[in-house]
Image (tube, rainbow, N blue to C red):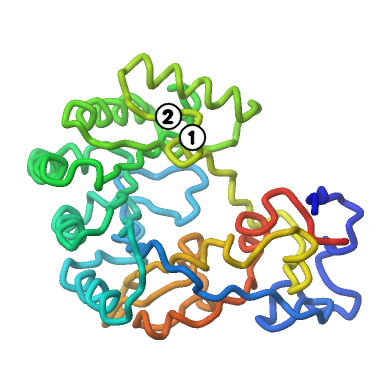
Amino acid sequence: MKDHAITPDDASLTAQAPDGAAKFSDPAVTAKGEPRASVPLSHPETLWFNTGTLCNITCVNCYIESSPNNDRLVYITEPEMRAYLDELTARNWPVREIAFTGGEPFMNPEMCAMARTALARGYEVLILTNAMRPMMRKSVQAELAALIADYGPRLTLRISLDHWSEEMHDQMRGKQAFARTLDGMIWLRDQGARMAVAGRTLWDESDAEARAGYAALYARHGFDIDASDPGTTVLFPEMDETVDVPEITTACWDILGKSPRDVMCASSRMVVKRKGAATPTVLACTLLPYAPEFELGTTLAEAERDVALNHPHCAKFCVLGGASCSA
């Protein structure tokens, strides 16, 4: 069934239901009293590790508020990560990829050790990075070059490049950020690293225009990255929590012609370690690191339970994508 556009007069977009119940307040029912949709972990493919929220820069509108001072999520260690890999095996999760995000992952002194452990066990590894100074330290370069040489295409570095132009990128990340990231990308290119790019769709340009800009940049620098492939040039929308969106009911799946399997929490979980916590914890979603209702427990066994779609991000980014499930 064709998706319907979200419109201001859509009754499902009111901030509260007629009885005054707030939206996204009850994991079982919507503000209108309808059964809320939930998602089972049907096909685990990726286990994410947040390496810590510390970052070498402070970006405008960073969804996780990473900065040189934010240590709300502290460094995960290699033994802590390894314990979760052991549990993956014990519980027979068919995960193919171990992914690392931050903060800036290469600020974690055990980043390369964690990547090597995961690669040695046969997993593909994805590292999200700004490719700036933390990655370009001599000690990190030596370890990373060895990983690239040893494991080749099973290791992917996804570079945060908010826009294909220096001017726009630096608006988000600060003066000379674009040039420093390009230096890192050029070094990775020369090591034979497999690269992808994560950009943003904040600017007044079409998807085609954005991808053409990235394609020209890649060609100019000899980067072997496909600008037309949304899996290797990933363009993320802005995550504005003030935008009103409909709640997702169980009826939405049929109305939208979608399946719970299409939602990210059907195929992934993320491990974080909160400041002051004795152990890491497992979250349902990479986009909601600070939402306590999306904590599932300290083990993967606890994290196998269904996830209620009880947050605006669930609707806007993971289910609707610009559509409404109002009939």
Residue, x 72% and y 66% (percent of image)?
Answer: 253
Which residue is labeled 1 in the image? 229
Residue, x 32% and y 18% (percent of image)?
Answer: 221
Image coordinates for residue 306, horizontal then vertical, percent:
55, 79
289 lies left or right of 201: left
The image quarter in which residue 144 lies:
top left
Image coordinates for residue 131, horizontal then vertical, percent:
28, 37
- Element at badge 1? loop
> In the drawing, what numbered circle is on residue 88?
none
Judge the density around disc 1: few (<14), some (14-19), many (≥20) Cα neighbours within 10 Å.
few
The image quarter in which residue 176 lies:
top left
Residue, x 58% and y 60% (percent of image)?
Answer: 262
312 lies left or right of 286: right
Image coordinates for residue 202, horizontal then vertical, percent:
59, 36
Residue, x 80% and y 50% (percent of image)?
Answer: 2
27 or 93, nearer to the observer: 93
Judge the density around disc 2: few (<14), some (14-19), many (≥20) Cα neighbours within 10 Å.
some
116 or 295, nearer to the observer: 116
Image coordinates for residue 258, horizontal then vertical, percent:
69, 60
> In the drawing, what numbered circle is on residue 226?
2
**Amino acid on which disc 1 is placed:** Asp
160 lies left or right of 171: left
Whether pointer 2 and pointer 1 mark residues with C-beta atoms closer than 8 Å, the reply is: yes
In the depicted structure, whether residue 115 falls above or below residue 41: above
